[in-house]
Image (cartoon, rainbow, N blue to C red):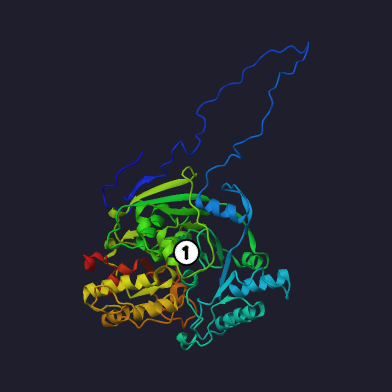
């Protein structure tokens, strides 16, 4: 049933699509057997009960059906031994996260439904992270952070990463930055748990082998008071990625390949499970990139089986005990997709959809106006290390404005403090300065979702931008006529050096 990839086209890297075996799925009957008709006399002569042997109690226990990772996590959280896709269950929540955009609305619903003086269900399981509209003079945006602060003081919320001094983020030791990266860095992501957040990219945390998904303000308001939520168990799509990862590819290329293959609606309300030797070789930050964009395919959640890489990352970050789960060997998957990663090439998603996939080299004539490196998708430490690697290899200066927005305060410190391998002791910030990039900005979501007009690097005019972010819909980064090419940090940096969409192999090979 498998077919080998031959031509290097964007759609040729899938080796085995929807390879479903009869051992896992029951096939519909291909024929029917007519019922036998018998003539029976209505006259009853006598009735005799057959002799029955003594019935012994079962010694094998209840019959259990194999489950996927997501099904197991939700089963545990709903205190059930068994769950199947399509079931609706009340799930106990381990962590609820909200931020400055959705937090005030969620708080308002909580107070309306539970009472002005109501207390949250657990002050230590709520994480509140200002990160979206922070470094702006917009009064309504600033007021949102004030509402969060007042609520956290009122409820004595343990994990509130506040910011008061907008002029110098370093003067705010509690401030972190982008919520999805801060959740991981601060030890709030743990295998086997349920993490809900009022942001669609909450699915990023699935990289830790947990169920993580975005919810709306109404649901979050209910969770604040009840600590649980009614969820439908999703079916699971499995993505098997094998082969050695080429030196010019990053996880961003992998997820763009997948979204291009199945479309932005191909995983609607499905769990996307990532396995294979390639996935096992990825760092935690790269796994986060992979899970981050499952929502761009319509996915309910993304998940990666936890392993030694996961456990090492968590060392020193959390003291909370956790119990990882894994899909059973006979678990049922709606579809299975297989990729030979060694044959992939650097990709971009052209305007105006994340599934508008193209090879980077096919877009070499696209002239660009700027490059943006940042966000929960492409603003992590390793993302900036990757960009620095390209700049270092080229020895050239950028030809278009290149904006750098570290996701968190820790990432910002890494940009200025960590040496880039093979650079002779230089840090990312030094390499960026030599290449003529803009000075790394204060950590936040920045221009990823546009924001107020004074947001750093916002596109206030029609421009063409190569970005390491996650969405390229009209108006996403500001101006509704702006054009956004989604790309990996490698491709973004290479494009900055030429002023055109550029395959990073021009500098890395």
The answer to whether residue 188 is left or right of residue 488 is right
Where in the figure is residue 83, as x and y percent of width and height?
A: 59, 48
| Residue 210 falls left or right of residue 106 | left
Q: Find residue 176 and report its horizontal and vertical position in percent.
A: 48, 78
10 Å crowding of disc 1: few (<14), some (14-19), many (20+): many
Q: Give above or below for 483 relative to 20.
A: below
Helix, strand or loop under label 1? helix
Is 31 situated above or below 151?
Answer: above
Q: Is residue 349 visible?
A: no
The residue shown at (61%, 40%) is: 62
Quadrant of image for the C terminus: bottom left
Residue drawn 44% across and 73% down?
448
The residue at which mark 1 appears reads as: 204
**Residue 240 location (% of width, % of height):** 39, 50
Q: Is residue 68 visible?
A: yes
Work out whether residue 271 or residue 53 is closer to the camera in this orientation and state it: 53
Left or right, 503 with reference to 82? left
Residue 54, quarter of picture:
top right
Residue at 43% of width from left, 72% of height from top? 375
Vertical placement of residue 56 versus 292, above or below: above
Q: Is residue 371 left or right of residue 23?
A: left
């Amino acid at each position: 049933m498998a077919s080998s990839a031959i031509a290097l086209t964007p759609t040729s890297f899938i080796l085995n699509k929807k390879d479903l075996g009869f051992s896992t799925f029951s096939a519909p009957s291909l024929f029917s057997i007519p019922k036998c008709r018998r003539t029976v006399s209505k006259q009853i002569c006598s009735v005799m009960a057959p002799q029955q042997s003594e019935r012994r109690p079962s010694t094998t226990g209840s019959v259990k059906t194999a489950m996927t990772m997501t099904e197991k996590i939700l089963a545990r959280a709903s205190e059930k031994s068994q769950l199947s896709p399509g079931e609706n269950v009340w799930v106990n929540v381990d962590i609820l996260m909200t931020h400055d955009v959705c937090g005030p609305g969620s708080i308002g619903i909580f107070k309306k439904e539970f009472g002005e003086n109501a207390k949250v269900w657990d002050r230590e399981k709520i994480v509140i992270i200002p990160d979206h509209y922070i470094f702006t003079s917009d009064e309504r945006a600033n007021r949102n952070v004030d509402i969060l602060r007042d609520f956290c003081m009122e409820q004595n919320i343990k994990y509130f990463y506040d910011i008061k001094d907008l002029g110098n983020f370093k003067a705010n030791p509690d401030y972190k930055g982008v919520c999805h990266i801060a959740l991981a860095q601060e030890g709030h992501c743990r295998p086997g748990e349920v993490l809900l957040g009022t942001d669609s990219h909450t699915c990023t945390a699935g990289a830790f082998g947990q169920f993580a998904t975005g919810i709306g303000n109404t649901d979050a308001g209910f969770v604040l008071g009840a600590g649980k939520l009614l969820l439908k168990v999703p079916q699971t799509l499995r993505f098997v990625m094998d082969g050695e990862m080429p030196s010019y590819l990053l996880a961003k290329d992998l997820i763009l390949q997948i979204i291009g293959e199945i479309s932005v609606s191909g995983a609607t309300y499905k769990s996307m499970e990532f396995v294979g030797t390639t996935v096992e070789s990825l760092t935690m930050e790269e796994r986060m990139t992979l899970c981050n964009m499952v929502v761009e395919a319509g996915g309910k959640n993304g998940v990666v089986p936890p392993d030694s890489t996961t456990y090492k990352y968590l060392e020193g970050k959390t003291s909370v005990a956790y119990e990882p789960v894994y899909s059973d060997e006979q678990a049922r998957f709606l579809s299975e997709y297989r990729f030979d990663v060694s044959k992939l090439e650097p990709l971009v998603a052209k305007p105006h959809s994340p599934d508008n996939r193209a090879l980077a080299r096919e877009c070499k004539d696209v002239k660009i106006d700027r490059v943006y490196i940042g966000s929960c998708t492409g603003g992590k430490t390793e993302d900036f290390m990757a960009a620095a690697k390209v700049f270092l290899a080229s020895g050239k200066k950028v030809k278009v404005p290149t904006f750098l927005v570290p996701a968190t305060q820790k990432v910002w410190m890494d940009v200025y403090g960590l040496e880039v391998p093979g650079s002779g002791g230089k840090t990312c910030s030094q390499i960026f300065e030599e290449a003529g990039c803009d000075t790394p900005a204060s950590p936040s979501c920045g221009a990823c979702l546009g924001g107020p007009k004074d947001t750093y690097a916002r596109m206030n005019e029609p421009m063409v931008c190569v970005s390491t972010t996650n969405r390229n819909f009209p108006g996403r980064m500001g101006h509704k006529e702006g054009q956004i090419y989604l790309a990996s940090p490698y491709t973004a940096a290479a494009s900055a050096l030429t002023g055109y969409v550029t395959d990073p192999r021009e500098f890395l090979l």
